[in-house]
Image (cartoon, helix red, strand yellow):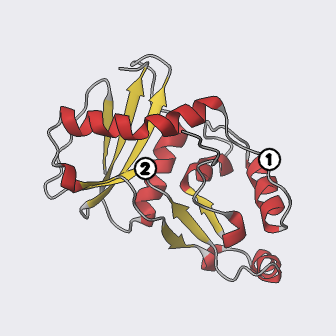
Amino acid sequence: MQHNSSGRKTSFARGDIGASMIASLDDGIDSYQSANEVLQFALDEIQGKKKKDIDNPKMFAGRMLENTILDMYVNTYNIDKDKINIDPPVIQYDITPLIPEKVRGYLSEHGLNKVYISASRDAYLVDDNPVLRKDCNVAMMAFQLNEVPVEVKNISGSQEQPIRSNHWVQLQTQMLCAAGPDHGILLRLINGW
């Protein structure tokens, strides 16, 4: 199957920054890009400049494996398949009031009157009775609501490898945008197991 998309459902040109990029804004968090790279990417997109493709073979493989990893989770824990949505809509949290007036003016000049943190969850689980489970392949974050965000990661390190801080921030951001769940699920497939 041909798949040319970068996988981004969020867009700076629409006035939103995705949950996966939030961690990049803090230099103290291990991330895949710097705050300056995110800023340049945003400015280029807002100004209509051609974007550099951010896709790579590992990201492509990760996206292709997401549904398989979700199926493994559902089967391992006997979760009712009607309780998991694998194509959820993008959810948003309005941060316009938090943006300095000068920046809001610049954005307004480019047609952006609202700015959002947006989250395109890999899936969400309708969880009527949340239970914390933890093993070497599945890590859950216990932090309430029943639309629990699910983030899927395909990890090539060992099972002892700690969860990357930017993945925690991404899941926390999804929880913020979902307006209320007290936990999220971070699924990690480690070395294909």
Seen at 29% across and 38% down, the residue is 71
Does residue 46 appear to the left or right of 80 in the view shown? right
Q: Secondary structure at mark 1?
A: loop
Name the foreground residue: 44 vs 184.
44
Q: Position of residue 11 (x, y in %)?
A: 66, 63
Q: Which residue is mark 2?
A: 122
Seen at 44% across and 57% down, the residue is 174
Q: Secondary structure at mark 2?
A: loop
Q: Which mark is residue 52?
A: 1
Contact flag, marks 2 and 1 (Cβ < 8 Å)? no
Considering the image in quadrants, where does the C terminus appear? top left
Kind of residue at disc 1: Lys
Q: Position of residue 170 (x, y in %)?
A: 50, 49
Seen at 31% across and 32% down, the residue is 138
Marks 2/1: CA–CA distance: 23 Å
Residue at the limit of the structure toward the front, as seen here: 1
Kind of residue at disc 2: Asp
In the rendered view, tell whether residue 80 sits above or below residue 114: above
Q: Position of residue 10 (x, y in %)?
A: 60, 61
In the rendered view, tell whether residue 98 sits above or below residue 127: below
